Amino acid sequence: MISDRQDIIRRELETGTGAAIGMAVDQTGTRTGLRLWFADLDDRHGPVAELRPYGIRGYRVALGFGKFAGEVVRQIQSAGAEDVGLARALVASISPTIDLDLFGQGRDDWRVDSGAFKITATARGLPENLDEAVTTVCRDAIVPLMAAMAELIGYDVIDEDDDEAQACEGAILVSTIRRRERNPRNRLLCIRLHGEKCACCGMEPRSVYGEAGGIIEVHHLEALSLLAAPRPYDPAIDLAPLCPNCHRAVHTRRPIPLSLSELRALMSPLMDMAAV
Ligand SMILES: [Zn+2]
Ligand SMILES: [Zn+2]
């Protein structure tokens, strides 16, 4: 049953959004559904995703706002360009096999214009097993949609700036990179686009460490562009997945980290055999 899958769904949503999630099984319809929201806003003061069975082996997710979400909608409307860009990239990362309806708005330039804002995502041909179907639709649609909302609302990225980073030359650059690399929504987008294989050594932590392998990190590739600003930051192309070792190694040079090819050139030939 859906209710048995709530722990998995909550874990994936909380990891992907960086926010605490509330959820309830909804038995008001003829078929059991699931409602999800950000715990601190409850289901009336913020965005709510409703999951319902749709046809045979299909599910539909409807994302909308609660009755009293005016304040959060205003907050979303004042989100910065970088947050808006990441939110749109997360929605754009939803598989084309899922039918997205933005009610007249474009997939790449949508905005939350009022509390009546709505997105539906319809997935068809899901696994016959109900649990698997629910998990799939959560992973493929609810997580990116709710992560987009979390980014627009601006759930805090825990910033553990150490003194070393503050003191070194290029402190602003270092802290901007850290903020982006630690943002759970950037991590989610990076994994959705590039998978969990280290872009430097080719190691896939999940295949090595099993269920303890959710440790891939996000690396910001374009540190130089922050200095010269030749083009705006694009989370879809400026981020790469790195294993914790390679990530630590590229950041041994500061403030501009080693490039992936520079690190590969330093690595022993044995390690290099696994390179992508
Ligand atoms: Zn690596
Ligand atoms: Zn990095």
Image (cartoon, rainbow, N blue to C red):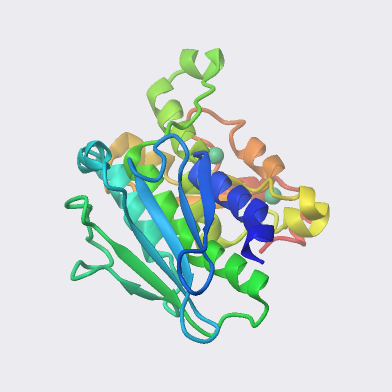
Residue 194 pos. (x, y %): 54, 62
Q: Who's the residue at 18% across and 71% down the image?
A: 104
Q: In this picture, is 26 found above or below 38?
A: below
Q: Which of the 4 image quadrants contains residue 94?
A: bottom left
Q: Is residue 5 left or right of residue 35?
A: right
Q: Which of the 4 image quadrants contains residue 202?
A: bottom right
Residue 257 pos. (x, y %): 53, 36
Q: How many marks?
A: 0
Q: Nearer the viewer, residue 93 or 56?
A: 56
Residue 77 pos. (x, y %): 20, 43
Q: Is residue 125 left or right of residue 265?
A: left
Q: Who's the residue at 44% across and 50% down the image?
A: 147
Q: Is residue 37 left or right of residue 243?
A: left
Q: In this picture, is 152 found above or below 5?
A: above
Residue 82 pos. (x, y %): 30, 43
- Image quadrant in which the C terminus is located: bottom right
Q: Which of the 4 image quadrants contains residue 217?
A: top right
Q: Who's the residue at 48% across and 12% down the image?
A: 167
Q: Is residue 55 visible?
A: yes
Q: Nearer the viewer, residue 215 or 39?
A: 39
- Image quadrant in which the N terminus is located: bottom right
Q: Who's the residue at 74% across and 53% down the image?
A: 205
Q: Is residue 220 visible?
A: no
Q: Nearer the viewer, residue 54 or 187?
A: 54
